[in-house]
Image: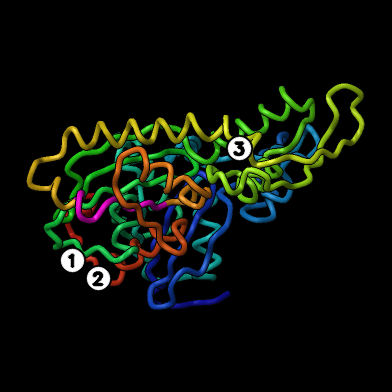
Amino acid sequence: MNFRIIAKDLAIDLGTSSIEVYKKGEGVVICEPSLLVLDHQNKAIKAIGEPAKDMIGKTPDDIIVQKPIEKGVISDFNLTEAMLNYFFQKINPGFSVIQPRVVVCVPSGITDIEKRAVEDASLHAGSRDVIMVDESLAALFGIGLSPEDPRGVLALNLGAGTSEVCLVSLNGIVASKTMNLGGDYIDKEIVSFLRNNKKIEIGINTAENIKKEILSLKISDKEKSMNVEGRDLIDAKPKRIKLRSEELAEIILPFADKIVDMIYLVLEKTPPELSADIKNDGFIMTGGLSNIKGLKEFIEKKIDLKGHVSDNPELDAIKGAGIILEDPDRFFKYKSR
């Protein structure tokens, strides 16, 4: 068994679809699905992370795939603790006299009870101290925003479980609006669309691939297509269809319109002193759903502001949490107690 005096401190983005871990001094070392596979009879954990995702839709009835994080918050405390302990051990294997300090990203809209659940799960999994930081703020720090910057920044944080529009200035959120819809909702809508319109049943992993490959709001992408395999709902035989991007527009358009409505609600609460900053700088998109082709351009046209997306928006939050981990005193206001 490995033995050390002090374990390396960690930062965690505990997301609905994935868990990302930053190790102090090394950077992002883990990016895996936040999933577990359980034996339904004795609740034994069979797999966690990437191996668990590979089992979705392929398990017998007595084996279940479980998501311990739903819409950005803990839905099962014990499973979340087990998942955190697994990743903690993966990074700091063996025994440590002094356990790691952990920075955890949390959605801005969660309650005090939900924050306490995140903190307790982290402590029980083996951390000595927990610093919680708003996920949208962490993402902006990961992009390059300074916490001391007095200018207003309009941010769209589009994740798997939730979508948030917030106005940030001077290390804090001035106004925000959140809805419990994100990438997982889009995946389910794709499954429903193909079931109702193409009479084919597909798995959630296939829907996620469709979202990444051909879901687009760009007119130039309307003929983009891919082959989709599933089960025929009429005769139950394996079935393959050719799906075009244009056919999926009805799925993403209502979601995009909801994002625009949220932006207007936040802009209505924006102090006049910060409106000029937004007019000059536009908005920033972060989170994995920011990768949907044409979404930025659609929002730009609707609100007449310029949009910006980082190279890897799905990693912005964990990079920002890592920055906080490296210099926690600079962000001390986020300490949970």
Q: Tell me the CA gap for discs 1 and 2.
A: 6 Å
**Residues in magenta, as a range:** 278-286
The residue sitting at 61% across, 50% down in the picture is 212
Q: Amino acid at mark 1?
A: Arg
Circle 1 SS class: helix
Q: Amino acid at mark 3?
A: Asp
Residue at image mark 3: 187
Residue at image mark 2: 327
Q: Amino acid at mark 2?
A: Asp
Evaluate if marks 1 and 2 touch, with contact meaning CB atoms under 8 Å apart. Answer: yes
- Residue 140 in the image: state x and y as whole percent: 30, 58
Residue at image mark 1: 330
Q: Tell me the CA gap for discs 2 and 3.
A: 37 Å
- For label 2, count other residues whose C-alpha is less than 10 Å away and answer few (under 14), some (14-19) or many (20+): few
Q: Is residue 141 visible?
A: yes
Would residue 116 appear left or right of 296 to someone viewing this image?
A: left
Of the pair 94 and 106, the residue shown nearer to us: 106
